[in-house]
Amino acid sequence: MGNRKRVAERRKTNPAVLGGVIAVVVGGAGFGAYALFGGGSGTGDGTRTSATQQAKAKSGPLSAAEITAAADRFLTAWQQGEVSEAADATDDPEAATALLTGYAKDARVEDVTLTAGTRTGAEVPFSVKGTVAYKKIAEPLAYDSKLTVVRRDGDGEPRVAWQPTVVHPDLKDGDKLVAGETDTPPIKALDRDGGELTTETYPSLGPVLDGLREKYGKTAGGEAGIELRVVRGKESKKAEASDKTVLELSKGVPGTVKTTLDPKLQAAAEEQVAKKAKASVVVMRASTGEILAAANSSRGFNTAFQGSLAPGSTFKVLTASLLIEKGLASIDEKHPCPKYSSYGGWKFQNLDKFEIKGGTFRDSFGASCNTAFISQAPELKDDDLTQQAQQVFGLARDDWQIGVSSFDGSVPVQKDAPMAASLIGQGGVRMNPLNMASVSATVKAGEFHQPYLVSPEVDGRKLATASRTMSAGTVTQLRQLMSYTATSGTAATAMAGVSGDKGAKTGSAEVDGQKKPNGWFTAYRGDLAAAGVVQAAGHGGKTAGPIVASLLKLGG
């Protein structure tokens, strides 16, 4: 059990500490007057005064004084427990009222002290200190947050832009903070060697550990404690976000869950993604599906398992398998790679408008020629790519059970230009590093093995299977194509130091409103398969490639 103490008698609240200076704010009537002057007065019959009629909405950039005053008003009212006044200081009083009310009622946070930091533009950081009290147990709570001041629609008055993250950085729309006895006991997650997995050692594993607790907490043999937790709402659950522990008031007894993670590879993956702003990577064993490492630069969302991004040209591995099976391409046969290729009203081109005259499919694949794939669109049915993804690679069926929440890709049936774009990993195709590592693993193993983080023997769950496998000839050609790309194509530089049996494919996926494309890389070495993405960073061979290659070297 954690340290217990009797809840102290609630002390009288003080004004918020703002930027190191005590901001004295008049309660009650003072706020009422502020609201009155801000909204205008009435004449008794609902008609506004002439002064109000003549008033113009405020516009233009916010002044430092306006930002500071709006932040002070909100923070002071929140600290004093004046929920309606704090909510009125935001641009969404209804949503603010609900969450701020729950902060005291459900989260049971008392004696709140809010201290503003140094303003940057319209953003004001602040620290939160308080006490979470449940029955006879109380523990201190401390964290940092921030708010942004904007002009309210209509009258232009400065208001705090309402977001759940203002109350706590882990909150999303519909979520709430709740203190009490937990429904799921804590778990102690172990790596494949029996070592404990913690966020102190592996910072990006937070979402994974939360997911393991959510799935196995009730069956792993532990006992529940008392905690302050983020309880996810409907929208967060749609995104498969797990509940999150914010503060432990009374320790439970953890149950034990063993994973397939390799401690050496996981540590290296953490180190690699930390070098990039938005990077994710997954390493798995091709012959079994065991996930050996998974890491993300971002700590709040598990892009490696749950991301939904266009995979760009890495998806050409799957498309190539389809073309070979249908007799539309063969590794050493001549294959067109013009500068442009049109289909469905769209004109497609290659990077820098290159072309390969008299080249083979091997040349086109190794150089990542878009038009070599687009040119085959007239020969395909609208659902051919979808069926290949589902039936051979086990993707896009929503039936993977890896041990925590994951997304197993999307390859919708499309027609015309979007269908053609899907052939090069754009259009409606969406993947994540786990999916693309699985694609390389399927090529290397010759058949699909569903990736998993927790052995199915732990809970008897049934892993997904593919309904058919590729012919031996198709598998051989795919391996040769990926090997050529790793030694002489767009992946050669990144894979230069990787020895032994290897194959790879690069990718760059354009994203609307993004100056640089997302860089993708998928590869295998021996029995290891891996894939990574670095968002908004450029070509995959230069961005994600070095991350994936370094892990394949280490794992070999």
Image (tube, rainbow, N blue to C red):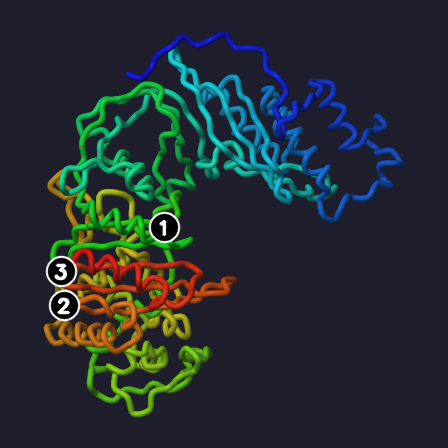
Q: Is residue 425 visible?
A: no
Disc number for residue 274: 1
Which quadrant, please, contains the C terminus? bottom left
Q: Residue 31's quadrant in the figure? A: top right
Question: What's under tag 1, amino acid-wise?
Answer: Ala
Q: Secondary structure at mark 3?
A: loop
How many C-alpha atoms fall within 10 Å of the one at disc 3: few (<14), some, or many (≥20)?
some
Q: Residue furthest front?
A: 497
**Residue 403 falls left or right of residue 205:** left
Camera-near label (3 vs 1) is 1
Q: Residue 534's quadrant in the figure? A: bottom left
Disc number for residue 527: 3
Q: Position of residue 320 (x, y in %)?
A: 25, 74
How many C-alpha atoms fall within 10 Å of the one at disc 1: few (<14), some, or many (≥20)?
some
Write the residue at 37% across / 40% down.
Answer: 237
Residue at which label 2 appears:
500
Q: Is residue 467 visible?
A: yes
- Badges 2 and 3: C-beta atoms under 8 Å apart? no
